[in-house]
Amino acid sequence: MLTLKSVDLSSGNIDYDGTVIVTGNVRSGFEVKATGDIFVKGFVNKSHLHAGGSIFISGGVQGDGADDEHSSSFSAKGNIEAKFINQSKIYCVGELLVKEYLLGCDTLALSKIGVGEKSGRGAIIGGVSKCNGPIIVNTLGSEAYISTKVELGTVSAAQKELEKTKIKRERRMAESQQLSQILERYKQSDEPTLVGKLTVDKARKIEDTFIAIQKIIEDYDTHIASLQALVPDADKLYIDVKKRVYPNVDICINDVCHELDREYSKVRIEKDEQGVAFNPLSQQGKG
């Protein structure tokens, strides 16, 4: 575990194998990398944090949407938690949990986005928020009708890759079955040196090919399992807005989109047979 008072000129950039704790602030222009978790007790200003675990920021995050160099960016294989995040790029495999607001952020969370779920203002304003699970928020958009985009089930590349991999696996399975049948006929043949016109050497090559294909199928199975973890569960693709959603919010759920031209209050937004549906939140279960 590495503990620092702050990340600034005195510390330089941090690249640590383990957990990093910053008791103060992360200053503008610096980078913190850790294979474990990253804890920041203060604020993060126009900096870059990348964790093999989770990222916890007690204060807020100030980025700058002008360009990548001056923006804040975060990536974590676990969760990301902060008081507020402004003008930043965010990626997490786990949950993104923010108390006050996400303002003008480019966000991708594979599990869930919760803004103000337990306490705080809880607003998503501007930017693009993508998630492969539910989004729980108090307010979506703003009274100024700032353009805000929300996408659920957005990692469509994973779905396409999954379908392609399954087709490849089926083809290899067919090849494997054909080779297995040929080898079985060889074993049952009265002439051990021939299978039709095949010599023993050729039969051995077929057996080697059969073993190689079995290994490829095993690799496909591993790849399919990893891709399935990225493909969202349709039942978990919804947005619960506990207070209000404003016009000029563009919502896409599994590539079905709807741009709001009116306000809704206390609503669950999800996809049904007709498109994007807006149902009273009071009628929904806890999800």
Image: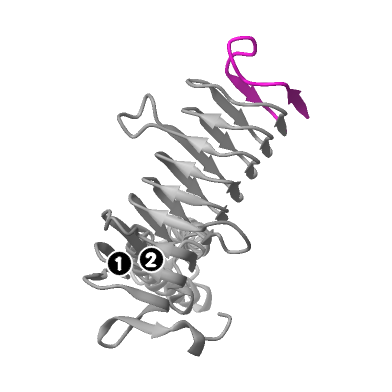
Q: Amino acid at mark 2?
A: Leu
Pointer 2: what residue? 152
- Tell me the element at label 2: strand
The image position of residue 264, as x and y in percent, is 34, 76
* In this picture, residue 209 sits left or right of residue 250: right
Q: CA–CA distance between discs 1 and 2?
A: 8 Å
71 shown above or below 172: above
Pointer 1: what residue? 251
Residue appearing at x 66%, y 21% in the figure: 6
98 shown above or below 44: below
Question: Callout 2: few (<14), some (14-19), or many (20+) C-alpha neighbours within 10 Å?
Answer: many
**Residue 202 makes an appearance in the image:** no
Residue appearing at x 50%, y 57% in the figure: 219
The image position of residue 8, as x and y in percent, is 59, 16
Relative depth, front residue between 286 and 207? 286
**For the C terminus, which image quadrant?**
bottom right
**For the N terminus, which image quadrant?**
top right
Question: Callout 1: few (<14), some (14-19), or many (20+) C-alpha neighbours within 10 Å?
Answer: many
In which image quadrant can residue 245 be found? bottom left
The image position of residue 53, as x and y in percent, is 65, 44
Residue appearing at x 46%, y 28% in the figure: 46
Relative depth, front residue between 33 and 30? 30
**Residue 287 makes an appearance in the image:** yes
* 1 and 2 marks in contact (CB < 8 Å): yes
Q: Amino acid at mark 1?
A: Ile
Q: Is 72 colored magenta in this rendering?
A: no
- Tell me the element at label 1: strand
- In the rendered structure, which disc, 1 or 2, sits on the residue that comes first in sequence? 2
Q: Is 10 colored magenta in this rendering?
A: yes
Q: Which residues are magenta?
A: 1-18
Relative depth, front residue between 173 and 13? 13
In which image quadrant can residue 251 be found? bottom left
